[in-house]
Image (cartoon, grey):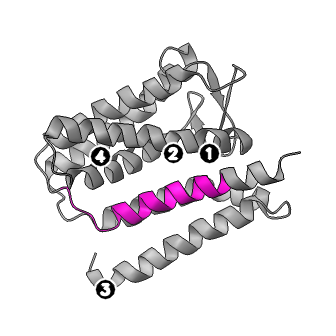
Amino acid sequence: MPDRFYRPVLTLLILAYTAGVIGLQTPSLAPLFRSLVPYNLLGSLLLLLAFHPDWKPSFRFYCILAILWGFLIEVLGVHTGFVFGNYVYGETLGWKLWDVPVVIGINWLMLTYCCGVICDALPLRVYLKTIVAASLMVLLDLLIEPVAIRLDFWNWFEADVPIRNYLGWWIVSLIILGIWYGLPFRKQNRLALPLLILQFLFFAAMNLVFFLTKP
């Protein structure tokens, strides 16, 4: 996408995530904004990929692999509890296949892509970039989990989010990001950093509001 569209797209994303925080906390608007969550994830990914500079076959392979691996590992997790612990998906993330929202694969692609681009700029060896990027994924999940439970993204059978969930996130992310760094395509995207920052700010704001308004 031409550079002249960068600022309008970034402005659109900022407005969308800001509206999401407000809408999801407004009782009369919350049902509508919950129904829009899957479309926001899909829209964010499409805008992100519009700024990707290198659509060679190896990149397309990564995209397909990240979506399928992320989705199928969630199917395994939901039905066995082996990967992340015992959990079940709610209705907010939309249409499901094998009890897992289809959009979850899109989320794995978007987040690993953003973390991969950001950490690629670090002056580190590739294996260290992979470790840092996977750890960044887990850091974001620490913010996601309380919000996901409150908004019915998913729910845990245990009283608290199990530690194995975060370990599972790290391992799955490490595998996807290892493939990301191993494939020969350009790993620059000027929208990746602001989009990931928006993700962190969105979930941090939601956590703050839930904390301030809890009974």
Give coordinates of residue 12: x percent, y percent.
Answer: 51, 76
Q: Could you tell me the amino acid type at mark 2?
A: Val
User: Is the Cβ of the residue at disc 1 closer than 8 Å to that at disc 2?
Assistant: yes
Circle 2 sits in a helix, a strand or a loop, which is it? helix
Q: Amino acid at mark 3?
A: Arg
The residue depicted at 41 percent of the width and 34 percent of the height is 70
- Image location of residue 82, percent across then percent down: 50, 14
Q: Which residues are magenta?
A: 187-206
| Residue 196, image quadrant | bottom left
Q: Amino acid at mark 4?
A: Cys
Quick check: marks 1 and 4 in contact, CB under 8 Å? no
Q: What is the spatial separation of the Cα atoms under label 3 and label 1, in whole angstroms? A: 32 Å
Residue at 57 percent of width and 44 percent of height: 143
**Is 7 one of the magenta-colored residues?**
no
Which amino acid does the dot numbered 1 rest on? Leu
Tell me: 35 left or right of 126.
right
Farthest bottom residue in view: 4
Q: Is residue 202 magenta?
A: yes
For label 4, the residue is 63
Q: Earlier in the sequence, mark 3 or mark 1?
A: 3
How many numbered markers are drawn? 4
Q: Which residue is mark 3?
A: 4
Q: CA distance from mark 2 to mark 3?
A: 29 Å
Q: Which residue is mark 2?
A: 103
Which badge, 1 or 4, comes first in the chain's sequence?
Answer: 4
Q: Which is more foreground, mark 3 or mark 1?
A: 3
**Residue 172, percent across and down?**
37, 29
Element type at mark 4: helix
